Amino acid sequence: MGGMKVFEKIRNLAEKDFNEYLDAEKQKGRKIIGYFCSYVPEEILHAAGFVPYRMRAVGSGSTARGDVYFASLNCTFVRHCFSKALEGDFAFLEGVVFMNGCDHTRRMYDNWRHARLAPSYLHMFTAPHLINPLALDHFEGELQKFKKSLEDHFGLIITPESLIESMQVYNRKRALLAEISSIRKDPAVPIKGSEFLALMLAVTAQPVEEAVTLLEEVREACRGRRTAREGDLRIFLSAGCVEEISHLELIEECGGAVVADNLCMGSRHYDALTDASQPPLRALAERYLTHLSCPRMMNDFRRRLKYMADVREGYAVDAVIAEKLKFCDLWGGEIFLYRQESKKRDFPLLTLERELYGGGTGQIRTRLQAFFEQIRNRRTIAGDPVRSDSSNEVRH
Amino acid sequence: MAFGKNGKPLREFHMLKLSRTLLYLIYFLSKTPRLATVLLYLLRPLYVPVRETFLNKKFRYGLLTFGAGLLSPDVLKAYGYGARAIIDNINEVIRNAREGRPIVWVEWILNPEMLDAFDVTSFNSAILNVFGNAYGAEGPYSLIEEAEKFGVPVEYCSAMKLDMGAYITGQIPRPALTIAGSHPCDTNVSITQSFEYLLGVPSFIFDVPYWKDGYSYEYFEKQVWEQIDFLEKNLGRKIDWDRLRDMLERLNKFNYYLSEICEMQRATPCPGTHFNLLFAWVVRELNVRSPHAIKMTEALYRAVKKRYDRGKGVVKKEKIRVLLWFPPIAFFTYLFKWMEHEFGAVVVADFIGNVSTVQIDTSSKESMIRDFAVTQMHLAMGRQCHGPAEFITDEMVSYIDGYSVDCMIFTGHQGCKHGWAAAKIIQDTCKKKNLPALYLSIDIMDQRHLDEQGVRNQITEFFRSHGWVE
């Protein structure tokens, strides 16, 4: 497939909540199971013979129906998703796996049951808030419970062999994603941040086997490709839920190139491989508990910080953009800490608060332009021995 | 960083010391409870019917909190013990801060019993959530503003912002260690990390499991053992099991009296003001280790039992039995006595004051830790908020059914996102039970959202619209 064609295909897949791959699997009688959050082990769903589908608000026109169940103080991701559920947009699912990721999403499980929405398999999967040996043991037990609930509900058996096979194919997918992401180290930036987000949306809504094929095509298409423009600023983007490709395109339009991230639909999805030499559930527990964390993990901020520092260095990052959806305490707190670090380590930081599919493009564009302009001015001044001033910090 | 007189920074521990002054006042008044009750009643025109003014701002909140002359003398006497328990903790904390001795912060849904076994000073950083009002109405929200100016997210629960504001303005002491947990909400999960970053002291965090089953209790129990290791390592001393046994036996007694009071509250007419249970919860949070804490619950139990045995209610003519659901309004603690006095409306159960726990088997180290873990997971707010919505609604329904409730007042706190996300489930549960309910949109710490008068107006209209009052 030609380079442009594959990116068009990805874009096309990313903009739909249901696609031809899922349709084909359904025709074959394969069940599709939706899941929230990067802590839910896809391998267990896959080993059971299902297609794991990352839940999303793509295609949602409004939060109106969800607002009956959720309050205006709840985040727009949850309200959009629940609206879609009430509209019947997830009718193709045979099950939904929820997660205690945050206070907003964990209530989705409660409201879904309260509204008596299909499908019949609704499972609350829980993950610890800490990373330590005790939490790991506990988490392994949660995985065991999850596996058993699938077996009991659907009348099947998930064998260790099938789990190992699934782990291998998911490792392949993750390795490819990591490889494609890392080619953004190249100054030519062979794949844009917006394209990479589209890719993430695509490969989390198709069977993993197809995803691997698609990723191999993308890897090929990226060879010798250049998307970087003269003067683009290299950006590290850190946030919770970001699924609007147009938002990343806006950053690009303003002169930024997102070269690395810490996003749910980004590096948190593919960071760390499963150790196939361990017993399957143990290996999965270890991978899912210790992969690049989000702020729900209470004892891991220093590691997240180190990740950001390593990426800033390894990817020659010029600036950090940290975002949150309104009313997200977890990312609010993370951004507070980023600000402290930005003062200490003197790196440019822009913090944005947004609503998912909430517009506000003009305002965000202005803030991005001002931020990028300040960074460029700062560089100019830093290069000028007369005007150079060490207190000239960039922080928004 | 300033909101004191003339914009000057507040002196270190100024608000903590004001809280202590207020508590001393209550403590001394409780020494002669009959005389105090009469005095408080006679002086009511100075502080009850009017809003906070320049003249009454330093004592209005305190006197209203302690019943404004409407508490019976035996209950006022009990409150004196509770006040003494808190005073002792404040004194010890201030002394330790001055002398450079260690203070351990213990989060508000993890009580300080374990620290008694290490003979180390515990401190609840949320103390000013309640007693910050002793500074006047602007006390709590000034601390909230300081936290927001410092960069703490505005959408955080105001209780946590207040803690941060208190710390950065030097109103509470810096700890040597902290003990925190992952419940009840995201703000707690998040701000624990901020405190850990800012304080740079060793911190032990409990990962509170989502469910309440054997597997979850066992996980928490293992963490209690780890907490002991953490304290031994960081305090450089061994746990004293005899001290822990003694503490937990006192805790059993403490919980027994409160559970008995909760049971008696089922009676019609209701024999006690529900504020008793809330004040006991505050004392428990701040210093259940004090011998005065037991004295308080025992005295409260006797006072309520006396009325219960005589079939007497806390009000002469009980008209409305109220379930107060969700955290109580910290700046309007007089709500209970006001509703009783004004409308004969008695709160019979609530989210925080009602006790639901186990008695701890102190026969062995293992049984102590096992049961202690369960008591920690069953503390108010923790037990309802860390799991599915049924943890909120099942308990609510059990009170609606078991306490002959006429209506519910839902104190919808702004910072409580998971609470608001469950509001429809709560509403539908009430509808199913055919229970009239008032849904307040309020910030329980920050009265700029809805103030005392606003609460009074909404409750009055609610009672009127249902024909319960003229």
Image (tube, coloured by chain):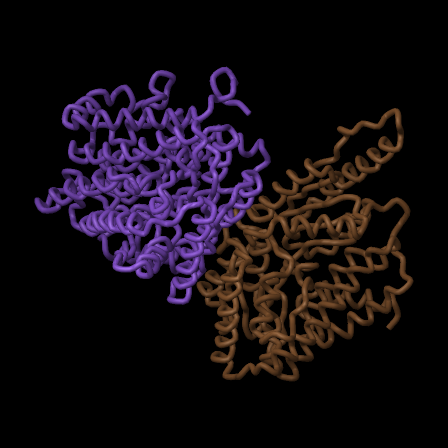
Chain colours: A brown, B purple
Residue beneath the point at 79% across and 68% down = A9
In the rendered image, the quadrant that contains the N terminus of chain B is top right
Q: Which residue lies furthest to the front in this view?
A: B237
Image vertical order of residue A251 relative to residue A41, above or below? above
Which one is nearer the viewer's eye here, A252 or A11?
A252
Image vertical order of residue B289 relative to residue B379, above or below? above
Which one is nearer the viewer's eye here, B98 or B326?
B98
Residue A132's spot in the image, x, y percent?
Answer: 54, 59
Left or right of residue A53, residue B392 in this image = left
Residue beneath the point at 74% across and 56% down = A245
Residue A305's spot in the image, x, y percent?
Answer: 66, 48
Image vertical order of residue B47 relative to residue B267, above or below? above
In the rendered image, the quadrant that contains the C terminus of chain B is top left
Left or right of residue B148, residue B320 in this image = left
In this view of the protein, can residue B438 be seen by the observer? no
Left or right of residue B302, residue A151 in this image = right
Which one is nearer the viewer's eye here, B366 or A81?
B366
In this view of the protein, can residue B289 be seen by the observer? yes
Total residue callouts:
0
Residue A133's spot in the image, x, y percent?
Answer: 53, 62
Residue A361 falls in image quadrant: top right
Residue B421's spot in the image, x, y percent?
Answer: 48, 53
Residue beneath the point at 29% across and 60% down = B364
Residue A254 falls in image quadrant: top right
Which one is nearer the viewer's eye here, B2 or A83?
B2
Q: Which residue lies furthest to the left in this view?
A: B310
